Image: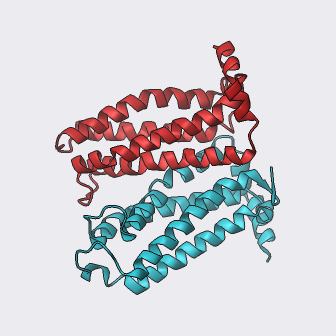
Chain colours: A red, B cyan
Amino acid sequence: MTDVIATLQNSAIGLALGGLDPAFGIGAQLLHISGLLLLLTPLLLLNLQLLGVRLSSFPLQQWAQQSQFYQWLGVSFLLLSGLFMWLPSATLYQPNPAFNLKIAVFILVLPLHFWWLRFLSSQPITPGWYSKSLATLNLALWSLVALAGRAIGYVAA
Amino acid sequence: MTIEALLQAMYDSPLGTGLAESLLLYPLVEGTHLLSLTLSFGLIVLVDLHLAGIALKSQHAAQLLSQLRPLLWLGFSVTFITGILLVFASGPDLVANFAFPSKVAAIIIALVNAAWFEWRYGRQISQWPEQRHYPTGVRLAAGISLIAWSSALVLGRLIPYLDSGVPV
């Protein structure tokens, strides 16, 4: 695994990205935050309703359908900017426990998230223990992804 | 008391020192600051885009604002409190960092703009008929809000990259 990561880092793309002006790194971080906001803000409006907050301006099924594009856009921003930041320093990230936690939870939450979004889009939901549990789980996992991401810089590999 | 002295006193306080030296607490506060942006910045963008006539066109501003206001207040409270905690842990060098005073200025512009909007239009919103185009002043306030809050976000992200005004 270490060899594969080192090869990726030393690939032409990895080296080219690593040689870019630091302004591109800042741009990638801003894109990463924009992605997070595009994904999590519509998601919050969905999950908060399932947890009992009344938001009639955002009817569940309709909002789930309308916000899908923005949530996909958010995930694309996250992946693109994440790759941009990771590739030039992949071997530094690899032993970092916060990074590994972030990636593990991200891989877990992503299919769950889009399954959940499809489910909410496809039928009217009456909030109950089942939807409340999934809404809580979804919010908790995404929060963990964000918190682990912030911790990367502070946790020694 | 100068701003540097105030920041030094904050940094030297048990709270400032504790935060700066904590391996767990500081990233947790920073992460919470980031997450709270989904409620504060994310929702303000949604409201501003609606007022500018771009998003949620079928909604009425009065209903939208009345529903989102409690969440916005919650989001801004968490963002503000965690932001102050981050300042406690940063020390007096923060003033010399171009991005920090610029971020504070952007936040002040955004807050003055929001106060002006509430003062000028706050009581009228519920009387507005269903319409796709709000008055020019409303759209202007929405545009200023979008620019000011986005600038605050970008400048906040720049803080760690700028050391005494010199890009690293």
Residue A15's place in the image compared with B132, above or below, is: above
**Which residue sits at x=69%, y=28%?**
A14
Quadrant the C terminus of chain A occupies = top right
Query: Residue A42: x, y in percent?
Result: 37, 50
Query: Residue A25: x, y in percent?
Result: 68, 43
Query: Do we see residue B154 in this rendering?
Result: yes
Query: Residue A56: x, y in percent?
Result: 23, 59
For the residue pair B14 and B119, the one nearer the viewer reads as: B119
Query: Do we see residue B85 in this rendering?
Result: no
Answer with the quarter of the image where residue A9 lies: top right
Q: Residue furthest bottom?
A: B120
Answer with the quarter of the image where residue B55 lies: bottom left
For the residue pair A154 and A2, the one nearer the viewer reads as: A2
For the residue pair A122 and B3, the one nearer the viewer reads as: A122
Left or right: A29 with respect to A70? right
Query: Residue A91: x, y in percent?
Result: 70, 24
**Which residue sits at x=70%, y=34%?**
A17
Quadrant the N terminus of chain A occupies = top right
For the residue pair A4 and B1, the one nearer the viewer reads as: A4
Answer with the quarter of the image where residue B162 lies: bottom right
